[in-house]
Image (cartoon, helix red, strand yellow):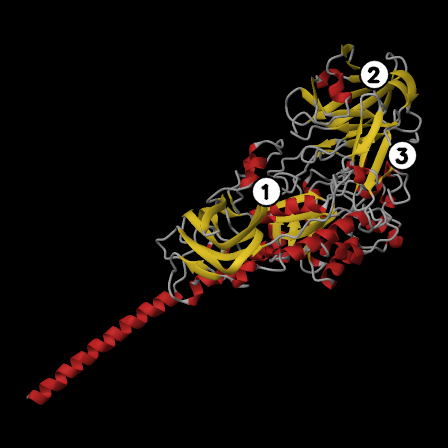
Amino acid sequence: MNFISTISKATRCKKVYIWILILWCYVCIGQQVTSPVPYGVRPSERLLAWHELEFYGFIHFTINTFTDKEWGFGDESPSLFNPTHFDADQIVLSMKSAGMKAIILTAKHHDGFCLWPTKTTEHNITKSPWKNGKGDVVREISEACRRHGLKFGVYLSPWDRNNEFYGTPAYLTNVFYEQLRELNTQYGPVFENWFDGANGGDGYYGGKRDNRQIDRITYYNLNELWNIVRTTQPNSCILTDLGPDIRWVGNESGLAGETCWPTYTPKGRENIDMPGLGLTRYVEAQFGHRGGKNWMPAECDVSIRPGWFYHESENNKVKTVANLVNLYFKSVGRGASFLLNIPPSKEGIVYKTDSIALAHFGNYLNKLYSINYAKDAKVSASSVRSKQLDFAAKNVIDDDRYSYWATPDNITAGKITLTFPKPIRFDVIRLRENIKLGVRSDDWEVWVKENDQWKIYAKGTSIGASRLIKGKKVTKAQAIEVRIIKGAASISLSDIGIFNSPELPAEKMPEIVRDSKGFVHIGGGTDAENKRIVFVKNYALTTDLPKKYAGPIVDTDSPKYFEPFLMKESGQISAGFVNEDGSINLISSKIFGIYPDTWQLFKNNSLFKDKKRLALDGNPETVWIIAIDSTLNDGLIIDTQKLQTIVGFLYIPDVSTANGNITSYACYGSENSKDWHFIKEGEFGNIEVNPRPQRVVFPKDKSHFRYIKLIPKQWVGAGSQVRIADWLLL
């Protein structure tokens, strides 16, 4: 009996032990496999790959390159397209040298000229003399991208100012959709399809020369558009006004908002009409929406020059490395992408000034990321989801973009500390979330420990795919602490990088001004530097304005600047500092109009005495604002006080706002202010989102006048006010 009782007790104890063991295993296994539940919307696989690119390039190259325009009208002859030394490898390698990982080519811009031998229209590269009509820019660029390890994307303008069927269903089914299929089936993988938001308006349209207004909410049938891309290139991201993958950031300055959420809720197709720069959709696109319904991150596009296409007059206006660094930190550094446009020249290569800037910028990025001081840190956290390595604090310093430190589900605030073996010097900190789990953190702070004292270094909101924090000066710290102050879900921080940015190359450029008496002054450096200024002046009167303002490039053989000189003619002054090694890194330039000494400014017959200098003072920061009645042909008139040759004019819009900037005009000339002769009319393409100076060249037989009248036909916004920062007669 005692023996049986002993066996029974032993059996019961064994069962208890087994159940305890099962329960322990269940708990451990459960802890090991349980990851945080994703919060909100998350990026698709194609968008994860897109986020990893961060920095890539645009190529704007078409008929406009040869006509000196930003927007072609559609009536340009294909015979104009004839690059003399086209080199796809030089273009791609120049862009790769900057650190770009992909390139998007404008296969067709608004003028309708196709850079590939399409079957949809005769307005294409086969009708050009380049390579006897056998060329294919799309193929050469796409293959060069593959040779050099870059991804390839295409820009296809929905608007076609050449095609006679634009605005009808036939254009969609027989032209636009087929062009999209050709580009996505004949040139290998396409990482991004880019569709411009400019749609409808004046155009050639097969010779009808009329105005085609379309309802772009419904006309293009976006569902069909997206379906073509999804079926032909399932891994390609799509950018339109409504995504569905990527949103335009709302400006062409390359800047995302300080807070820039990757989530976004479009207002709907009923609100997709083209607004002015300052209106709601443009502003919201810079910041996104916390908790938006779509994962639709921002793409920041900007050109390395003032214009999107190559213009000889902008050869001395290429962005400096300092400019590019600033844009990088305000795009990639805010969780968006940086799309930098590099326009090839008429020769078909990247101009040398642009390529040098790209190489120097790439060298800066290489040096910036060459040493990550976080790698040597000891890492600790206020709390960890479990003891499993999947969620350990030290995951933030490994090389895996998606390994991460995580907290328990109920802990949405916390801190992680990096302590260094010895104090480090740095000025850049990189934070990343594991975006596979959504955007979880709302407010963060970074603290640094200096001389055993904790001090706040920076604070902000969104982190997302990347947050770069650039300090104003180099800091020496014993430790760094990232504090998540508030979040919508538990923490999943995947990366903390700590870097010391390299010194920027010397990029001082001379300042060029003309005083109230017409004397040009060049300076801006120290006394020693000013003694090393060389310059070129190009102001011989000619009606061949593009060559006039291209001018010879400043080099060490250019004349030295000694003292101010009188310049009352129109023209361009270019100047540079000669370095000690004999090189010239950067050249500044400025276009001056004919000196407006005793000129008078009228609106029709009304003389403006007190306000004339706002339009004629040569200072683009002072803006002349005048009410115009477009139904009455209200004209703005300059009386130059004498009969003279005027080869054109330069209209400088107000860069502080789009509203009021002129988009189309008519220009007249007169010898006596009574008999007016038509000179030219046209448009200032893309001025709404890129308010760059607009140059107009007069025909050779219409350039000798005393009076010039400018009639604004259309301008941005619905009001009656027109804005002129400067109006230079050339």
- Identified by mark 3, the residue type is Asn
Mark sitting earlier along the chain (1/3):
1
Label 1 residue SS = loop
Distance (Cα) linking label 3 and label 2: 23 Å
Give the quarter of the figure containing the N terminus.
bottom left
Indicate the position of residue 265 as horizontal and vertical percent values: 51, 42
Q: Residue furthest left?
A: 1
Which residue has dot 3 on it?
Answer: 538
Q: Are marks 3 and 2 in contact (CB under 8 Å)?
A: no
The residue at 67%/50% (across/down) is 503
Distance (Cα) linking label 2 and label 1: 43 Å
Vertically, is 637 above or below 413?
A: above
Label 2 residue SS = loop
Indicate the position of residue 130 as horizontal and vertical percent values: 87, 51
The residue at 81%/45% (across/down) is 123
- Identified by mark 1, the residue type is Ala
Q: Nearer the viewer, residue 532 or 146?
A: 532
Which residue has dot 2 on it?
Answer: 599
Vertically, is 448 above or below 34?
A: above
Which residue has dot 1 on it?
Answer: 256
Mark sitting earlier along the chain (3/2):
3
Other residues around mark 3 within 10 Å, as few (<14) / some (14–19) / many (≥20): some
Distance (Cα) linking label 1 and label 3: 38 Å
